[in-house]
Amino acid sequence: MLELVPRAQPSRRMAWVSPLLALALTALCGVFMFLAVGKSPLQGLAVFFIEPLSSLRGWSEIGVKVAPLLLCSVGLALCFRANIFNIGAEGQLVLGAITAGAFILQFDDGSGSGGGPLMITLALLAGALGGAFWAALVAWLRDRYHANEILVSLMLVYVAQLLLSYLVHGVMRDPDGFGFPQSRLFDQGFLLPVWPGTRLHLGIVLALLAALFAWLLLSRLFAGYRLTVGGLAPLAARYAGFSSRRALWGCMLGSGALAGVAGACEIMGPIGQVTPSVSPGYGFAAIIVAFVGRLHPIGVIFASFIMALFYIGGELSQTRLGMPNAITGIFQGILLFSLLACDVLIHQRLRWRR
Amino acid sequence: MPPRLALRRITKTYPAVRANDAVDLTVEPGEIHAVLGENGAGKSTLMKIIYGVVRPDEGTVEWDGQAVQIANPAAARALGLGMVFQHFSLFDTLTVAENIALGLPPDTPLQALAGRIEQTAGQYGLDVQPHRHVHTLSVGERQRVEIVRALLGKPRLLILDEPTSVLTPQAVQRLFEVLRQLAAEGCSILYISHKLDEIRSLCHRCTVMRAGRVTGVCDPRQETEASLSRLMIGADLPVQQRQARAAGPVLMRVQGLDLPRAHPFATPLSQVAFDLHAGEILGVAGVSGNGQQELMGVLSGEDPRAASDAIALDGTPIGRQSAAWRRARGLAFVPEERLGRGAVPELSLARNLLLSHQEAQTVRHGWIRSGVVQRITADIIDRFHVKAAGPQALAGSLSGGNLQKFIVGREVVRRPRLLIIAQPTWGVDVGAAAQIRGELLALRDAGCAILLISEELDELLELSDRLVVMAKGRLSPSITREQASREQIGQWMSGLWPGAAQAAQETAHA
């Protein structure tokens, strides 16, 4: 009989092996799932794990998905480390798309000559401010009225989505768009530069820079240390004289701004206009990414890569295998559950006992 | 007659440590049997095995000569075992009777139970009122509730784990009378402690443990404290050298300090006042839960709710400044909780250094200077003999005593002008405790002002230049070490110092 025995110390090796084990378990579950619906598991796994990686186009499409996932999950990883459970990155992303879109629609006169690097920078900043503002609502309600940030940030997601819907059906709607609920297409000068021949845009660079900065923050900067202590031991933070309010505001504004930039990048990159759905749930998937990446800024780079792979694999399996759209969410969910299960092995080990 | 309880070759191994190694223990009927040992010697594990909380890896347990398997505490109680835990397991919001009913079958009528509680309590001269809510009881009263709860089961063996750590000297004497009466009626008592004088005055026999093994069985009445401590720590008790020296100028002045409760079970502070001079140790005696934690929080800045001018440092009001602000001006703090407050268990010692070392030497322009942090941490480990793998060892991997040595060392090397330290040797073994006390005296001789909050009267009498007593959120006038006697301090611990009643009335009318 197998039994779990507590370890004297948490295993550092297991902390890194566990996500890989979880990935393997997810693939295994995938095999059974494909078998259950009568598809070839080999073909299924190939569509998920091999086909996206076998062409430049596949890699670049992964990069397109990594950008928003990584931007959101870096911010969330910082929040979660500080025990601030912002699960509303999706709403902050949407708000970033709204503010960046509003900015562009204001300055883009449709002449084809507007835009340029300065305008792009300002539009990204507008997105950051929009996301930060949406997060600031959560921080304020928590700080002033002790409102639960999990609930507030989650519910503000739906408010943001409805706000976006209201705007694209109203003032943002393209007057020449035959009544379709979407804005007019942005001018080339307002779109992010792309890798030639692909849709891979500047957002991936911003995301990697954000991850790098977060890594510096946590490993070298005192501000990151304050966050870590505040999350691990609030009493110790008070003993040291670190302000928990400052941590709350800092984390919320920072992660909100990053999610806002992600939203801005989406409409200035692959979408190119404001539409009623600017994200297929990147903000929620980023929660899983943050945990799979061990809340570590470098870890989340790998985790967002895996999650992007699931998005592409999900899209491909719709066309190749006729699987439903839900398959992406199923794989994401199985991955999170497998990870939580494998994490048991960090603090305990398996022992064979007769 | 067979022994009431006999343990043979009990062994229990945890992942990192062998807590009990072939331990033998025999308790006769009607005997008060001491189990003496330092923290970490394996006493608590042994008691948990007897009470069925933990299962031994090897060895046998005999009860009245019969081999038994005690699977859980309910089985232990059914055999006739009672236990009074060191940390009470009472719910604050329930009454005494309701708390006791929780451990009994669900159909026990509360009124009848209250009668039984009063009867049992009266039989042993214990004052317990069944209908009072637990949060209105003092710590000593709560302990009496725990004892009555254990006695209701008509135990034939009663286990008490460090029962006197929360009692005034007078209350200790009353407890001993109860225990002697119980023993005279034939109930065996297992008395766990590290206090040598108590064991010598109370117990008939003594099993001494060190590092999980039994190092001796003796009659404590025939032994001296020195011979017992040699069995316990394997060495002679170190003696502190202290010189009398004149105190310097006033560094901190606390006047009219009031603090309302932060939560329903906190102790409000009322008109606390004292002066703290450079180069002196001011001891704060008192039973825990009388406002010491609140006082510590207010003085350290963790609780910034005090009136600004209630606390003055060098004549400047600082009541509303943060802990970091105060630390930058030469204050240092050692809280009583080490894990989670004085240190973060999940972080390395080097990282834990930064909790209090936040000046330019270790943090420059917001960047952590890892090399310097590493070096200072290594120096502390070296100088204070902290048993740790190195600066990268996690704080949570250290034993309580070693972590306390690190935390005290961390504050001492900052060369503070004023140190506020609570329970410096709580749960620390005798050797480490002596070292920590020596450091405090050295710091005092170097001119540091020290406020020492402790429950251990011996420690206070050994270290302090002056003593004050805290009771019910108020502070007594100070007396010098030479004037202080155990009896007087014990009385003051109940709040009965000259002028106390009058002061209480004045605030009530104000």
Image (spheres, rainbow, N blue to C red):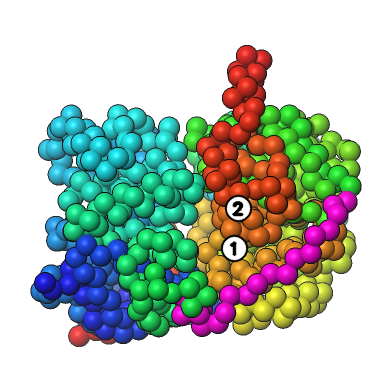
Residue B25's quadrant in the figure? bottom left
| Dot 2: chain letter | B
Among all residues in the image, which is located at the extreme top?
B509
Front in this rendered view, residue B6 or B133: B6
Residue on which disc 1 sits: B425
Of the two numbered discs 1 and 2 on the same chain, state the one appearing first in sequence.
1
Front in this rendered view, residue A82 or B238: B238
Label 2: how many residues lie within 10 Å, few (<14), some (14-19) or many (20+)?
Answer: many
- Span of residues in magenta: B228-248
- State whether residue A284 appears in this view: yes
Residue on which disc 2 sits: B454
Q: Measured along the vertical axis of the image, is residue A45 above or below residue A319?
A: below
* Identity, as a three-letter code, of the amino acid under mark 2: Ser
- Looking at the rendered structure, the secondary structure element under dot 2 is loop
**Residue A213 drawn at (x, y percent):** 75, 64
Instruction: Identify which residue is drawn at 32% across, 75% down.
Output: A4
Task: Say which quadrant the C terminus of chain B sits in.
Answer: top right
**Residue A130 drawn at (x, y percent):** 70, 41
Instruction: Identify which residue is drawn at 44% across, 61% down.
Output: B198
Pointer 1 with pointer 2, Cβ within 8 A: yes
Task: Say which quadrant the N terminus of chain B sits in.
Answer: bottom left
- State whether residue A303 appears in this view: no
Label 1: how many residues lie within 10 Å, few (<14), some (14-19) or many (20+)?
Answer: many
Inspect the magenta stretch and tell me whether residue B300 lies in it: no
Q: CA distance from mark 1 to mark 2?
A: 9 Å
| Dot 1: chain letter | B
**Residue A173 drawn at (x, y percent):** 64, 34
Instruction: Identify which residue is drawn at 56% across, 34% down.
Output: B495
- Looking at the rendered structure, the secondary structure element under dot 1 is loop
